[in-house]
Amino acid sequence: MVRPPSTPLSLDPECLEALESFAIDYNLTRAARRLRRAQPTVHAQLRRLADAIGAPLYARVGRALALTAEGTAVLAYARDSRARLESLAASLAQRTTDEQPTLATGEGALLYLLGPALAAFRRKAHRSPKLALGSREQTLAAVRSAAAQIGVTALGAAPPDDLEWRTIATVRTAVVLERTHPLAKKKRLEIQGLAGVALVLPPAPSELRAAIERQLFDRLEVAIEARGWPLAMHCARLGLGAAVVNDFCVPPSGCVSVALTDGPAQRYVVFKRRAAGVSSTVDALWQCIVERSSS
C-alpha cells in the first residue's frame, strides 16, 4: 500500500479525530464510545486514513498495539490542526467578547447558584452576559466550540483535561414537600425514609435518580418524572409527590425543604478553554463566578 508521490494528500478531519481518540489507549471500543460512533465506523475511518497516507497507522508489538512512525506523524498533525482550529475559533470569538461574553449553563445553576455572581458582573461591567441554557453535554460543547466563553455545570467525574476549571460549589440533596406532608416536620431524612413515598424524580438516566433507585429498589414509588428543579418543585406544591432536588433550590410557597443526609452530592464547576485568549469582560465574569459562588 504505497501512495504515488504525485497524488494530492487529503486527510478527512473525522478520520484524524478517530486517530486521536484511538491513540489515547489503543482500544477501538473505547475510542468509538468517546466519539459516540459505532466501532466499525471508527475502524473504517482509521483504514481510510491509512489508505490516504499509503502506510499503516499502527501495528502489533508483542501483545500490544503501537503507532507506526507514519501513524505518530499523522497524530502530531491531527493534534496540531485541532489546536490551530481552536485557536482560530477563539480568535474569532474574541472580537465580540469584549462587548458581551456568553455564559453556557443549566437552568438550575442559573436560578439557584449564579445570581450573586451575575449581579456582581453587571455592576462591574455594566452589562449582563449572553446566556446559552442547556444540558451538561451541551454546556461543555458550547465552550469547546467557542459558542460560549465560560460554562458552569455539575460534573460527577473529574472535568476534562482540555479545560481550565474551578470548583465553585458542592451541593447536597433535599426533599421538597407540602407543609402538610407527613414528613414535612422532619429536620433531615435518609433515603430509606422515602420508601413507599410518592416521589417526583428526574427522568433516567440521572445520577440522582440512580442513587435513589439503588437504595429503595422495589420500595421506590415514582409519581412523576420531571425534567428541571422548578417543574419538580411545582409538582410538589400541587401535592403530586415529594420532589428530590439539589439542596440549593428555594422551595415554593407552601412547601418546605428537608435535607436528605445520605443523598448524592453534586460538584458545580466553572470552566473555559485553556488555549483561548481572554478579554477583560470574560476575565471579569470568571472572577465574579469564582468569588461570589460558595464552594
Image (spheres, grey):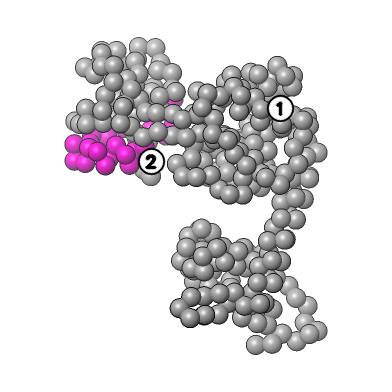
Quarter of the image for residue 91 reads top right
Residue 47 screen position, x and y as percent: 58, 77
Q: Is residue 155 left or right of residue 276?
A: left
Can you say which quadrant of the picture contains the N terminus? bottom right
Residue at horizontal 43 percent and vertical 18 percent from the top: 250
- Residue 234 shows in the view: yes
Disc 1, SS: helix
Identify residue for label 1: 284
Identify residue for label 2: 207
Residue at horizontal 40 percent and vertical 16 percent from the top: 252
Which amino acid lies under the numbered mark 1 shown in the image of this protein?
Answer: Ala
For marks 2 and 1, the one nearer the N-term is 2
Residue at horizontal 34 percent and vertical 15 percent from the top: 256
Circles 2 and 1, Cβ within 8 Å, touching? The answer is: no
Please tell me whether mark 2 or mark 1 is closer to you in this view.
Answer: 1
Q: Is residue 21 left or right of residue 10?
A: left
Residue 57 screen position, x and y as percent: 61, 76
Q: Nearer the viewer, residue 293 or 253?
A: 293
- Residue 238 shows in the view: no
Disc 2, SS: helix
In this rendering, is residue 258 above or below 32?
above
Residue at horizontal 60 percent and vertical 67 percent from the top: 19
Q: Which residues are magenta?
A: 207-231
Q: Is residue 229 left or right of residue 215?
A: right
Whole-number angstrom distance, CA of label 2 to CA of label 1: 32 Å
Which amino acid lies under the numbered mark 2 shown in the image of this protein?
Answer: Glu
